[in-house]
Image (tube, rainbow, N blue to C red):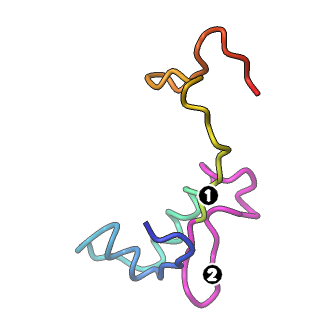
Amino acid sequence: MHPGRAFTREELLKHVWHDAVGHERIVDVYVFWLRSKIERDPAGPIHLVTVRGSGYLFDPPRTPAVDLASHDLTTGRLAPGTAQR
């Protein structure tokens, strides 16, 4: 919803965990686990990055444009007999 915006740990705690009481560092633990799931190299993240002095920024991977006519929208796969470009 907010591409290019860094969120502080406090903001993430408030918006993700709502009124739960917790230490801000719990956000770091969850960021660590998320990076292990979404980053090709979690030690050198490019999608879930730390912005020093600000917090964390999520920059989702860009996907190439998809020709919807050649895809089965129920499975997300190419329709039978369609060549992949």
Q: Secondary structure at mark 2?
A: strand
Q: Quadrant of the C terminus?
A: top right
Q: Residue 49 appears at what percent x and percent y?
A: 64, 70
Q: Quadrant of the N terminus?
A: bottom left
Q: Which residues are magenta?
A: 36-58
Q: Quadrant of residue 12?
A: bottom left
Residue appearing at x 65%, y 53% in the figure: 62
Residue appearing at x 61%, y 57% in the figure: 35
Q: Residue 52 appears at what percent x and percent y?
A: 64, 86
Q: Residues within 10 Å of mark 2 (few under 14, many from 20)?
A: few
Q: Along the horizontal axis of the image, is 29 left or right of 40?
A: left
Q: Residues within 10 Å of mark 1 (few under 14, many from 20)?
A: many
- Between 49 and 43, the residue placed more toward the observer is 49
The label shown at residue 51 is: 2
Residue appearing at x 60%, y 90% in the figure: 53
Inspect the magenta stretch and tell me whether residue 44 lies in it: yes
Report the residue marked by disc 1. Answer: 35
Q: Quadrant of residue 23?
A: bottom left
- Between 69 and 49, the residue placed more toward the observer is 69
Q: Secondary structure at mark 1?
A: helix
Q: Residue 59 appears at what percent x and percent y?
A: 60, 64
Name which of mark 1 and mark 2 comes first in the sequence. 1
Q: Residue 7 appears at what percent x and percent y?
A: 48, 79
Mark toward the viewer: 1 or 2: 2
Q: Disc 2 marks which amino acid?
A: Val
* Vertical relation: 16 (above or below) 68: below
Q: Along the horizontal axis of the image, is 67 left or right of 19?
A: right
Q: Disc 1 marks which amino acid?
A: Arg
How many marks do you count on the picture?
2
